[in-house]
Image (tube, rainbow, N blue to C red):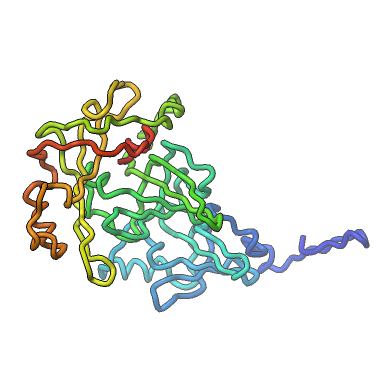
């Protein structure tokens, strides 16, 4: 069926191969997460990307980082790409996102993303424990930034990478399977919505959080006992953040050490069945000593040098510390660090 006229009560059809063989008829038909099979390649970009033709003038772009599951610049990969993505070759693709007004469609041809059953394509539908297959969009000091479908994104914090001993093994474009640890929605003063989604690497499809998790307890506040003293060798250093200069180059913003200590050391009534075994706290580098030499605070590197005498990544802290502030975080937020 090509067109219809309800007033005159008739419709018209087309037999042209270009119309009959078209995968879609307009950009509105392209939906994030949908798979389209045997779509012909119609062009190459200087950047390494590939264009495909859905028919009837509807085209899509496969960026160079979306051609293979793992990123690589080897000669062998280049030879494979020339053969697999030659003009007029047909490939299976999945829609990542669509801009109907701009008539743009971004696709992936990564084998794992095309075949995955674990799609995340709506922030509102995210659930704690849900699995999702995405790709690394950025690597930063904060961790791995992961993109999914339809603009959904999340972060695997650096500390989670260290716990799984995989820090430094993933690059931009690599496919990765994740589990949702937390998803929170925020609105600014202009009522614009943003999301904070915390992820963990999921190495097993059965590595889901059980359906019988008591979310009411998970979302309840875990009260810490302020003024509670943590003994020596109680807390372990899991991350160190360096100091930096203030805007304009005048003054220093102290760095901090993130410590992990047993939850039972910081709460009044520890419940093993409901609370995480450990929680994290932060000690800023200007809270280590009672008195600092003037030259120790002149530059970020000088303050960091003082801190490194007390904090070594992965080691226990050989000093007492005190809980000064309770952030009123929920159980699940403490689980996420």
| Residue drawn at (46%, 27%) of the image | 216
Picture layout, residue 46 above or below residue 31: below
Compared across the picture, whether 61 is left or right of 17 comes to left
User: Residue drawn 49% across and 71% down?
Assistant: 51
To which quarter of the image does residue 49 belong?
bottom left
308 and 99: which is toward the camera: 308
In the displayed structure, 287 sits above or below 323; it is below
Q: As drawn, is 286 to the left or to the right of 189?
A: left
Count the numbered circles shown. Answer: 0
For the question of whether residue 146 can be seen, the reply is: yes
- The one of 317 and 211 positioned closer to us in this rendering: 317
Image side of residue 115 versus residue 10, left or right: left
Give the residue at the far bottom of this rendering: 46
- Residue at the spot x=29%, y=59% of the render? 140
Q: Position of residue 239 (x, y in %)?
A: 20, 48
Q: Nearer the viewer, residue 69 or 307?
A: 307
> Where, quadrant-wise, is the N terminus in this rendering?
bottom right
Q: Locate residue 301 relative to residue 179 in the image: left or right.
A: left
Q: Position of residue 110 (x, y in %)?
A: 41, 57
Name the spot of residue 13 as percent of width and height, x first: 79, 63
Tell me residue 138's x, y (percent). 34, 60
Q: Residue at x 53, y 48 (%)?
A: 122
Which quadrant is the C terminus positioned in? top left
Residue 35 visible in image:
no
Residue 98: image quadrant is bottom right
């Amino acid at each position: 069926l090509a067109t219809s006229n309800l007033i005159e009560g008739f419709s018209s059809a087309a037999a042209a191969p270009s119309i009959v063989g078209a995968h879609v008829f307009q950009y509105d038909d392209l939906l994030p997460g949908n798979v389209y099979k045997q779509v012909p390649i119609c062009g190459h970009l200087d950047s390494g990307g590939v264009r495909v033709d859905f028919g009837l003038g509807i085209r899509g772009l496969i960026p160079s980082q979306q051609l293979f599951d793992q990123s690589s610049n080897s000669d062998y990969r280049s030879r494979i790409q020339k053969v697999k993505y030659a003009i007029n070759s047909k490939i299976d693709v999945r829609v990542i996102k669509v801009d109907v007004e701009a008539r743009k469609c971004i696709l992936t041809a990564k084998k794992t993303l095309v075949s995955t059953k674990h799609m995340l394509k709506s922030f509102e539908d995210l659930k704690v424990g849900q699995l999702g297959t995405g790709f690394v969009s950025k690597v930063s000091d904060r961790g791995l930034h992961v993109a999914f479908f339809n603009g959904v994104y999340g972060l695997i914090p650096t500390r989670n990478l260290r716990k799984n001993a995989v820090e430094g093994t993933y690059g931009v474009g690599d496919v990765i399977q994740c589990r949702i640890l937390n998803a929170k929605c925020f609105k600014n003063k202009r009522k614009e919505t943003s999301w904070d989604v915390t992820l963990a690497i999921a190495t097993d499809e059965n590595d889901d959080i059980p359906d019988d998790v008591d979310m009411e307890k998970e979302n309840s506040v875990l009260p810490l006992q302020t003024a509670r003293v943590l003994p020596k060798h109680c807390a372990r250093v899991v991350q160190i953040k360096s100091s930096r200069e203030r805007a304009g180059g005048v003054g220093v913003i102290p760095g901090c050490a993130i410590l992990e200590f047993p939850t039972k050391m910081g709460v009044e009534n520890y419940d093993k069945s409901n609370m995480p075994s450990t929680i994290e706290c932060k000690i800023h580098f200007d809270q280590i000593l009672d008195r600092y030499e003037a030259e120790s605070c002149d530059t970020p590197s000088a303050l960091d040098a003082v801190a490194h005498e007390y904090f070594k990544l992965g080691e226990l802290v050989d000093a007492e510390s005190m809980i000064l502030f309770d952030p009123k975080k929920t159980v699940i937020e403490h689980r996420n660090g």
